Amino acid sequence: MLFDLYRARIMGICRRYTANREEAEDVFQEAFVKIFKGISSVEEYLYLERWMIRTSINTSINYYHRNKRHHDYLGVDTVENFTEKESDIVAQLDNSTLLELINELPDRYRMVFNLYVIEGYKHREIALMLDITENTSKSQLSRAKVMLKEKLQLLGIDKFEKYG
């Protein structure tokens, strides 16, 4: 019952952090094994969903470290300043289009973008999770946003502010 209730949500998380559906399915399976093995450690039912989400994110990050850690590595560049308008790109897209665009990003950019924009982690936390510096996290987020902006412009979306 727990699996049926949360499988779509957990698969969505796994899909955001992996390069393709096959990898996502592997991470999804591993995440649910960890969830079922560790469920007794959750003391309050109210915290179950958040714990499952965190377990899924950690499993995805661990998969990344095991399989792709040294791919797409780029040095730290000057970090660009962001505006709120750029952060609101996400609000204009339907989920499938956004997921497709995010999945086209290089692995490191995708990881940082998801952790910062989607999950709400701070650069310090991301740096610890991915074993990079805070500046690298900021730089990779900046590059991810630039790449997404370019992809959006190719789709004919050239205004990046929320409507309404």
Image (cartoon, rainbow, N blue to C red):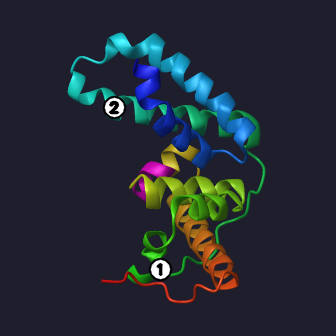
Residue 131 appearing in the image: no
Are circles 1 and 2 on residues that touch, CB within 8 Å? no
Q: Quadrant of residue 52?
A: top left
Mark 1, residue position: 86
Residue 144 in magenta stretch: no
Which mark is first along the chain, 2 or 1? 2
Residue 93 drawn above or below residue 70: below
Which amino acid type is shown beneath numbered disc 2?
A: Glu
Q: Secondary structure at mark 2?
A: helix
Q: Residue at x 42, y 75 (%)?
A: 88
Nearer-the-camera pick, 105 or 138: 105
Q: Position of residue 98 (x, y in %)?
A: 57, 64
Residue 2 appearing in the image: yes
Q: Quadrant of the C terminus?
A: bottom left
Nearer-the-camera pick, 62 or 1: 1
- Residue farthest bottom in this picture: 158
Q: Position of residue 3 (x, y in %)?
A: 46, 22
Left/right of residue 57 with respect to residue 29 in the rendered view: left
Which dot marks residue 49?
2
Residue 116 drawn above or below residue 69: below
Which amino acid type is shown beneath numbered disc 1?
A: Glu
User: Where are the magenta residues, as a range?
Assistant: 121-126
